[in-house]
Image (cartoon, grey):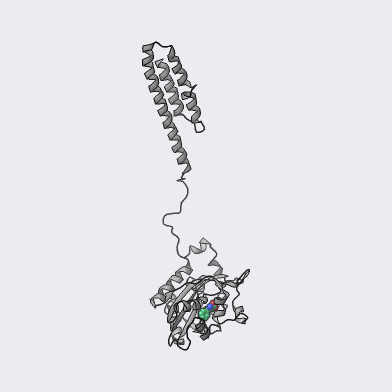
């Protein structure tokens, strides 16, 4: 009898020891510990034993039973842990990015931050405006009435079923927004994304960045504007950088200028990037039109101002010798990794 119990325990332990994944634990439990299992059958045999023998074997039977139940509980717990571990399976052989490969700022972001530093050092605040803009702020408030031909200067992306909404074509709408919000005097720059319905080429993208600037104060004149813009050119491109201002019409300034710097690629000789002119246009600027000041709630008889809009993407191209505007938003890491 004693031998039978210890054999049973051994077979049971062996069964648990080489449990295969697919084997049902319940099945083993039934086979050994169930009502008609091996243990129960063996215990029934005890009925035929003499009284004192039964006592001794009875104790052994109980011990065996407890040991088997314990063993089973342990096997069950182990299987549960395995299942959890399998759920949290981590492939340590999976390739990871090297720890020193961090990614870095986009060339446009770099130029943007450089300019933000420069302008905050000159007392400008940095503001923001919506990319989905109302037709009113993008055009009308900037002295461009609805049917004015100047609207055609900027190929606009209109929003279907929302005729009063546009993807802003410029950061200039923030001029009026800012004057309404902060009043005069005012000095601020607004970096941001703009959109135009362009057929794209080496110099044009449908999505690009500008940096708008606005200064409103008493006695502001053209010289303030020219000096500020030259300061920016030299800050970005060095003391020897040249900038020229030539007249250009923008409805929201009077007089208006375009600002150009020497072409980075041909250094003034003329090439595909600068359309053989030797110069690249990087900004529009001018003295704020009285109508725009009025829209902003500022009295033009008391205050004057100048405004400018840098093509941030264009500046980044100049600074980093990038010869195709389409690369900027292309998302090609081989391009981005060069900076
Ligand atoms: N918003 C103009 C453009 O996108 C640039 C500009 C800004 C011109 C401010 C004058 C004053 O072309």
Query: Where does residue 239 sit, x and y in percent of width and height?
Result: 42, 79
Give above or below for 69 relative to 179: above
**Nearest to the observer: residue 55 or residue 116:** 55
Give above or below for 110 relative to 278: above
Query: Where does residue 37 sit, x and y in percent of width and height?
Result: 48, 22
Number of numbered discs visible in the structure rendering: 0
Residue lying at 40% horizontally and 28% vertically, measured from the top left: 70
Quadrant position of residue 125: bottom left
Locate the N terminus and report the quarter of the image it occupies.
Answer: top left
**Nearest to the observer: residue 79 or residue 270:** 79
**Nearest to the observer: residue 39 or residue 154:** 39
Q: Residue furthest top?
A: 50
Can residue 323 be seen in the rendering of this structure?
A: no
Can residue 46 be seen in the rendering of this structure?
A: yes
Query: Where does residue 21 sit, x and y in percent of width and height?
Result: 50, 33
Residue lying at 43% horizontally and 17% vertically, measured from the top left: 4
């Amino acid at each position: 009898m004693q031998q039978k119990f210890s054999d049973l325990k051994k077979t049971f332990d062996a069964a648990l020891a080489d449990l295969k994944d697919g084997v049902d634990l319940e099945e083993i439990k039934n086979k050994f510990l169930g009502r008609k299992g091996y243990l129960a059958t063996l215990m029934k045999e005890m009925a035929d034993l003499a009284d004192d023998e039964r006592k001794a074997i009875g104790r052994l039977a109980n011990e065996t039973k407890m040991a088997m139940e314990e063993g089973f509980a342990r096997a069950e717990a182990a299987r549960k842990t395995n299942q959890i571990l399998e759920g949290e399976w981590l492939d340590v052989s999976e390739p990871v990015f090297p720890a020193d490969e961090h990614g870095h700022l986009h060339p446009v972001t770099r130029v943007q931050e450089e300019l933000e530093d420069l302008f905050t050092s000159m007392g400008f605040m940095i503001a923001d405006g919506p990319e989905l803009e109302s037709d009113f702020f993008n055009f009308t408030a900037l002295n461009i009435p609805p049917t004015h031909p100047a609207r055609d200067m900027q190929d606009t992306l209109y929003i279907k079923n929302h005729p009063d909404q546009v993807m802003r074509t410029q950061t200039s709408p923030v001029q009026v927004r800012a004057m309404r919000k902060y009043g005069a005097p005012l000095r601020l720059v607004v970096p941001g994304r703009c959109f135009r319905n362009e057929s794209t080429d080496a110099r044009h993208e449908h999505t690009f960045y500008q940096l708008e600037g606005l200064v409103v104060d008493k006695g502001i004149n053209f010289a303030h504007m020219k000096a500020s813009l030259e300061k920016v050119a030299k800050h970005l491109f060095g003391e020897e950088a040249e900038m020229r201002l030539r007249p250009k019409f923008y409805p929201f300034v009077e007089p208006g200028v375009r600002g150009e710097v020497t072409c980075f690629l041909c250094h003034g000789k003329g090439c595909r990037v600068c359309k053989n002119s030797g110069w690249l246009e990087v900004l529009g600027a001018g003295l704020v039109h009285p109508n725009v000041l009025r829209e902003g709630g500022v009295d033009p008889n008391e205050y004057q101002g100048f405004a400018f809009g840098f093509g941030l993407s264009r500046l980044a191209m100049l600074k980093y010798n990038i010869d195709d505007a389409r690369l900027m938003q292309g998302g090609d890491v081989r391009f981005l990794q060069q900076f």
